[in-house]
Amino acid sequence: MTAAGGAHVPLDIERLRRERAGARIGHTIDYFESIGSTNDRARDLAAGGAPEGVVVIAEMQTRGRGRLGRRWESPAYRNLYMSVLLRPSITPESVPSIGLTAGLATAETVARWAPQARIKWPNDVLLDGRKTAGILTEAHDGTAAVVAGIGVNLNMTADELPEELRDKATSLAAVTGRTVDRTAFTLALLSQLEECYGLLCNTGFAALRQRWEDLSCLNGRHIRVSGAGTEQEGTVIGLDADGTLLLRSAGGEEVRVVAGDVTVLDGYGSATGPCS
Ligand code: BTN
């Protein structure tokens, strides 16, 4: 990662609100200079009856959360920390498809700045094998809401990351060598998300599967998936129509994986490969 991350320019919240007025996603934008976690704020808004499409954005998070209980580094004015409140008419089993959809929209948006962007199942966005964006999807049954939390490292520099993450994570600016206009990126992501989510609601994940697979860095790779106390290993066949990851085990059986953390086992673990 280079040292050049550009000045700490605030988001142009007035422009964001103006350009998203009347949209399905982002018609209302709740904006904070600092917050614990935008996902927690979106959950509270959902509990208070807020409608689908409300978006929470913060310039920094003091308790940013990642998947599997991890912390999400959230320094001020560098990146994008955003949570989207959704109220999809889907079964609980289909909730993971929301995360896949948000991951696809994020990867397609990152690819407009850096065409080498790839998705690592379930929804990490990688640049040159390093994580640049992540999605934390949380379903709140009591309020029939799903919160899709999206974190994208835009202008963060290496010294803003803990040392142990420096070979695993990067930012769009570090890879391209150019400071990212965070407002323009946020607008592009919101409209990509609206398009992808519309297709998911109208047609189901099957309408997005090919686009997702085109950006996947795992097809044909030998992987291990860990999570919920189990481990599954096999060669990636692809995604099922509902977004389930399909593996071929050493014994030749098809294995279906709905959640977990992926480790690539066949030589693509290096920083030079498309996946870490
Ligand atoms: C991951 O571990 O890959 C998911 C990271 C999700 C981070 C985002 S930043 C905005 C939202 N608020 C949070 O506390 N987490 C998500």
Image (cartoon, grey):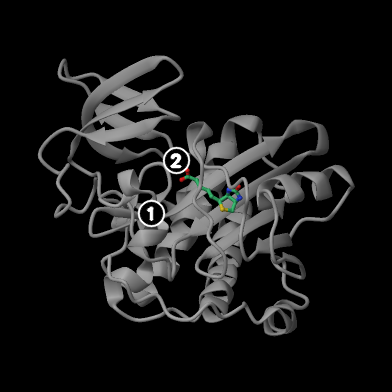
**Residue at left offset 56%, top offset 72%:** 186
- Residue 178 lies left or right of residue 36; in this view the side is left
Q: Position of residue 272 (x, y in %)?
A: 14, 55
Question: Would you say residue 94 is visible in this rendering?
Answer: yes
Q: Secondary structure at mark 1?
A: helix
Q: Position of residue 196 (x, y in %)?
A: 54, 61
Relative to 221, is 229 above or below?
above
Q: Decide which of tag 1 and tag 2 comes sooner along the chain.
A: 1
Q: Position of residue 96 (x, y in %)?
A: 53, 38
- Residue 115 lies left or right of residue 145; in this view the side is left
Q: Say which quarter of the image contains residue 238.
A: top left
Q: Which residue is labeled 1 in the image?
A: 212
* Label 2 neighbour load within 10 Å: few <14, some 14-19, many 20+: many
**Residue at left offset 39%, top offset 27%:** 257
Question: Would you say residue 205 is visible in this rendering?
Answer: no
Q: Which mark is residue 243?
A: 2
Q: Secondary structure at mark 2?
A: loop
Q: Which quadrant is the N terminus positioned in?
A: bottom left
Q: Is mark 1 within 8 Å of ligand 1?
A: no
**Residue at left offset 37%, top offset 66%:** 157
Which kind of residue does numbered mark 1 sit on?
Trp
Q: Are marks 1 and 2 in contact (CB under 8 Å)?
A: yes
Relative to 25, is 276 above or below?
above
Which kind of residue does numbered mark 2 sit on?
Gly
**Viewer-side residue, 76 vs 90:** 76
Q: CA distance from mark 1 to mark 2?
A: 9 Å
- Most extreme residue toward the left is 267
